[in-house]
Amino acid sequence: MMNKKIVSFGLIFLLIFSAGCDMIQVDLGGEDQGLKSQDGNISIVSPADGTHISVNQTVDITSDASLAAHAFGVHLIVNGQPYYFTHFYQNMRIFCIYQPWTPSEQGVYFIQTVLEEESGGQTESNIITIYVDGTEESPDQEIEKEVDDASDQQEEECVEPIATTHSYANCRSGPGTGYEIVEGLRPDQSFPIVGKSVSGIWWQVERNSSGATCWIWEDLIEICGNTDDVEVISIQEKDEVTEEEAPEDPGGEPDEEQLPPPKDPGEGPTTMD
């Protein structure tokens, strides 16, 4: 009766141990053993044959194994070459083991595991095929790519350099606050760029279809397009640029100094009835 109880407890222990295969951890090794089939059984259960993964993506090669004798360890073989060896520090007969593999190049890979007995005998598993495709992009790389694409698209849209005001701005007769105000500009007005000052902080723009020009301070505009070929115009810059050059938003229409009303030279004085 006592012997039957011992055998029963032994069978229960083996069933529980085999069910908890994911609890076994993998340790790196580097032994290269000869491959010859012996008694025993080992099979790769995951990933599935024909799985596609990406370069630098880690996948766990999971194997189920059973052996009449004691197991010494398991080899992971990639394209016929030893890649990974897991050594058992205690004798095992029924177990499940996972071994990580990370491909560094694209291609087709043939994966196999080999069970090694303590006595030196070996048992080979089934062979599965894994296809490794291009590198998997991280979210950060995708964001950077979107930003680059947006920049390229902006460059393509602006064949010629364009200045667009992002606030109320004074457009002057020359490069500097010492020159008179020619026109007051509103936000989001765009003008072709036709010249730049020697210092590079003032930009000459074409303000109307007749070719009339004026100068805008760089901090009041956004520039679209390549300005490398814009002509440098050697005109003396008067006064230093101050915060006065960026008039505040008046909360409505610009005042008379910022945006003078158009004048018709043919009109006479205005009278009040």
Image: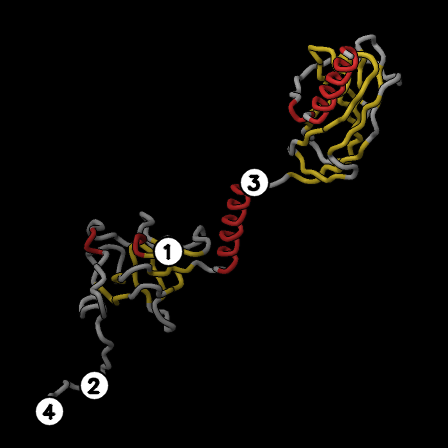
Disc 4 secondary structure class: loop
First in residue order: circle 4 vs circle 1: 1
Relative vertical location of residue 13 with respect to residue 176 in this rendering, above or below: above
The circle drawn on residue 138 is: 3
First in residue order: circle 4 vs circle 2: 2
Pointer 1: what residue? 222
- Residue type at mark 2 is Glu
Relative vertical location of residue 191 with respect to residue 199 in this rendering, above or below: below
**Distance between the Cα atoms at labels 2 and 3?**
67 Å
Residue at screen point 31% across, 47% down: 199
**Distance between the Cα atoms at labels 4 and 1?**
46 Å
Relative vertical location of residue 115 with respect to residue 242 in this rendering, above or below: above
For the residues bearing labels 1 and 3, Cβ distance under 8 angstroms: no
Q: Alpha-carbon neighbours of circle 4 within 10 Å: few (<14), some, or many (≥20)?
A: few
Disc number lying in front (1 or 3)? 3
Give left or right: position of 260 versus 101.
left
